[in-house]
Image (tube, helix red, strand yellow):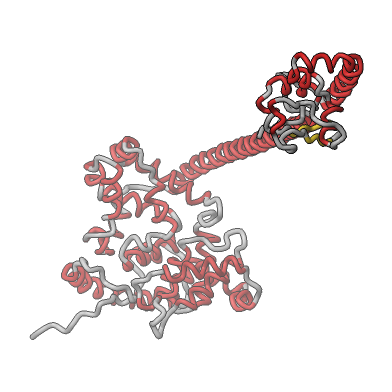
Amino acid sequence: MSQPPRANVDSYGFEWPKDFNHEQYDEFMSKYITVLSRRAKKWDKLLNSKEGFRKSNKVKRYVRKGIPTSQRGVVWSLISGAKELKDQQPDLYTTVLKGPLKQEIIETIDLDIPRTFPDNIYFKTESPDSKRESLKNVLLAFAHKNPLIGYCQGLNFIAGIMLLVTDSEDMTFWLLQSLVERILPDFYTKEMTGLLTDIGVLEELIKAKVPQVHERMVQTGVSWSMYVSKWFICLFAEVLPIETVLRIWDCLFYEGSKILLRVAVTLVIKNQDKILAAKNFVEITEVFKSLPLGATVTECHSFMQAIFRVPGSFPRAYITKLREYCREKVEKEKAHTKVLQEQQKQRQLEEKKAREAALELKRQEEEKEAALQAEKDKLALENKVEKLSPCDDENITTEESDIKVQTEVKAKEEAETSCGNNVSAEINQNPKAAVIASFSTESLKQVANGKQTSPLTHEESSKSATEMMVFPFCFEGAVCVWNVSFLTRIPQVRQLIRPQISCRTTIKDY
């Protein structure tokens, strides 16, 4: 007869891993269920006894052997102190939910809800029995009640399992409150002093009980906090199989956080051969990833027996002493870190000021340079305006040029007057030279105005009147001469008239 198809989830709604060993699990559960049914009867009798529920060695023994699923929620509320807290403020949960809640916390929780047990049918949006909204309510109420903690990642997994067990928002809230307030103080604060302290305690325990493992971790430079932080923050949820986690929590609520140390030490001891065989960081990481697999942790009953046997004795006084030592160490490291952070902050502030000062100095230098360049450009422009074109390879100012022109014109006129009587004789001997010599500025003007006829009457007499004339005009007080074509062929004329005109005047040849 063929076997009926197996459900793809366990009794808590978790999907089976693809490589899960069902045969091994079924063999274990067939025996375990029988044990649980016998214990359920004992728990019924204990809970309904006339003397009521009280902590005792008998209860401790019952708890270590496991609390039946049907009674786990009620027993947790009793052994953890959650019921006691609730009885003191029975309406607190409802009141807190009705109050104002910080939007920042709401947004953070909203981000973590979809990440909570995505392989569990009760935490999927399409599930009709989805507990997502209930989980959000519990986390919001807890954050409002504990402002110094607010919301801490990891609490979503813890509250999620509590909801699966109790099926009650109110009881889950009080279980979470008791866990954080009484059992694991300082674990979920922003500084996480309690968490760091217990990680230090675990390292000391490993050093004492399996020193070779401690040495290997030191040699490879691996920090215990890299792997153990998740173990302790999530209380092994998302690390070990759900049934094993519930058995650990049974003891945690009754005996306190020392159980977490027992579980961690047991896991290390049982896997020490693998850790010692690992040669580097990557291989050690793979070993720790493989810890949740195999019969060692799947068979929760034998594993719980191992945590009280394998590590040996954990005297409370010894653990307390280790915690005091490690807490002091943590506080010193935090103080040192704070000093370093302050120093770094101060250095960054000084570097920022130095950069700003350098930028300001550069800006001032650029402004000075720009101002200097502007002044240079201004002076250059003024010089360019005032500067005259070179004449006979000399640079003279406008004023100097005007004075020179006036002086030369005056001297020329005086020369013409003194030499007037000699012109006729010179013309008879050398007509062209005489005419050229007599070409003063004034005579040029007269010729141009038609008041004087050109004295050139020899071979140049055949030229037209236009060619025989010189056209002067004034520009800014200086005489400018446009000479006709015949003048361009007489070098003496150019030598004669050149001193008579302003250096700014160009003699154009045609």
Does any portion of residue 368 appear in the rendered image? Answer: no
Above-or-below relation of 412 to 33: above
Q: Residue 499 appears in which quarter of the rendering? A: top right
Q: Between 50 and 358, which is closer to the camera in this rendering?
A: 358
Name the image quarter holding the N terminus: bottom left
Does residue 428 appear to the left or right of 299 in the view shown? right
Q: Between 491 and 143, which is closer to the camera in this rendering?
A: 491
Above-or-below relation of 240 to 163: above
Does residue 71 appear to the left or right of 18 in the view shown? right
Q: Between 306 and 177, which is closer to the camera in this rendering?
A: 177
Q: Residue 107 appears in which quarter of the rendering? A: bottom right
Name the image quarter holding the C terminus: top right
Above-or-below relation of 424 to 33: above
Residue at 24 percent of width and 64 percent of height: 299
Residue at 53 percent of width and 75 percent of height: 137
Q: Residue 24 appears in which quarter of the rendering? A: bottom left
Instruction: State the residue lying farthest toward the left.
Output: 1
Residue at 50 percent of width and 75 percent of height: 171
Relative image position of residue 503 (x, y in whole percent): 77, 26
Relative image position of residue 337 (x, y in whole percent): 55, 39
- Exactly how many numbered labels are in the figure? 0
Does any portion of residue 345 appear in the rendered image? Answer: yes
Relative image position of residue 35 (x, y in whole percent): 26, 72
Does residue 3 appear to the left or right of 190 in the view shown? left
Above-or-below relation of 403 to 463: above
